Amino acid sequence: MNEAIPVSRVIDRGTAKLMPDVDRERAWLLTVDGAPQSYVDLDEPTHLEFEYARRLGHALDTVAEPGRPLDVLHLGGGALTLPRYVAATRPGSRQHVVEYDRGLLDLVVEQLPLPADAGIALHGADARKWLEGAPAGSADVIVADVFGGSRVPAHLTTKGYARAAARVLRADGVYLANLADAAPFAFLRSQLATLGTVFEELVLIAEPGVLRGRRFGNAVLLASHRPLDVAVLARRTAGDTFPARVQHGAALRAFIGGAAPVGEEDAVPSPEPPDGAFGIG
């Protein structure tokens, strides 16, 4: 029996490591410069190990009727966990993945190959530049999970970026994003305010301990022009191994408060996580 061994390689932006999970035969953890980035089980692509990934999975499950193929644009690739999930849960979907680090893409495809019929196209490019050149109305869902190291790049936080995402989405499309912040949530609140300049409907999913300011952590945002199935989303996230809270409507407007949308001139990356923080995209 061949024993899986770790793989380490210098990529465009640091050093990537793929480490086998001793408890799951063909499961791997991807880290970049020591920060966990992705977890994938090649035999069970519907297994989502990270909390934020499960919440994005719940969102993907509720944006359309179960099993319906979707056109999905993923900004940020990692180990291609969510594209594999969509391919397994919504066969026939057409997916594009945009990852800035071509060395990372090469490593993942080489060591953790995609199924031949997955319908996933990979692109080595800057997320915003690719988005701005994509056809209008070409995506049912955009999943933004872009971290330069452990921070969301500044040019992916602005009103111009939000308008570009809205242009690529179809009228009933949904924008999903994985972000990270801590109290007093200046970054997270500004991102909600920014998306609110373009989309009528906003939803926030986060662990109660994060929302109460007890720790730094991930938050999943949903934005669309149409009402989202908040009740189903709330049930699924509340029943998860690590329960999360869904905020929308008046409660979310109160959370946003007086936060201002982000212009190109005042954009900054997301905050640096404290040492030991886990779960970054």
Image (cartoon, rainbow, N blue to C red):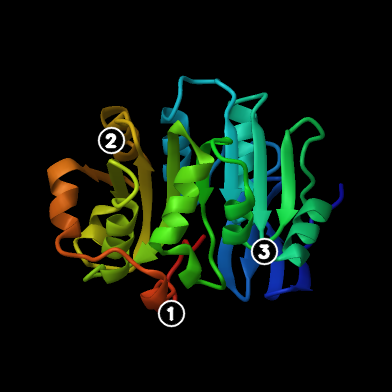
Decide which of 12, 275 is in the foreground and name it. 12
Give percent across and percent down for residue 164: 49, 52
Residue 262 in sight in this render: yes
Residue 12, above or below 165: below
Nearer the camera: disc 1 or disc 2: 2
At mark 2, the secondary structure is: helix
Residue 203, above or below 152: above
Q: Quadrant of residue 211?
A: bottom left
At mark 3, the secondary structure is: loop
Q: Residue at x 66, y 48 (%)?
A: 97
The residues tagged by marks 1 and 3 sit, at their Cα atoms, a distance apart of 25 Å
Give percent across and percent down for residue 37: 58, 62
Q: Which residue is mark 1?
A: 275
Q: Are marks 1 and 3 in contact (CB under 8 Å)?
A: no
The residues tagged by marks 3 and 2 sit, at their Cα atoms, a distance apart of 33 Å
Decide which of 219, 51 is in the foreground and name it. 219
Give percent across and percent down for residue 166: 45, 45
Q: Residues within 10 Å of mark 2 (few under 14, many from 20)?
A: some
Residue 129, above or below 10: above
Q: Which residue is mark 2?
A: 234
Q: Residue at x 29, y 30 (%)?
A: 227
Instruction: Specify whether 152 is left or right of 104.
Output: left
- Residue type indicated by callout 2: Ala
Dot placed on the residue nearer the N-terminal end, 1 or 3:
3
The residues tagged by marks 1 and 2 sit, at their Cα atoms, a distance apart of 30 Å
Nearer the camera: disc 1 or disc 3: 3
Q: Which mark is residue 100?
A: 3
- Residue type indicated by callout 1: Asp
Q: Residue at x 39, y 64 (%)?
A: 180
Q: Which mark is residue 116?
A: none
- Residue type indicated by callout 3: Tyr
Q: Quadrant of residue 235?
A: top left
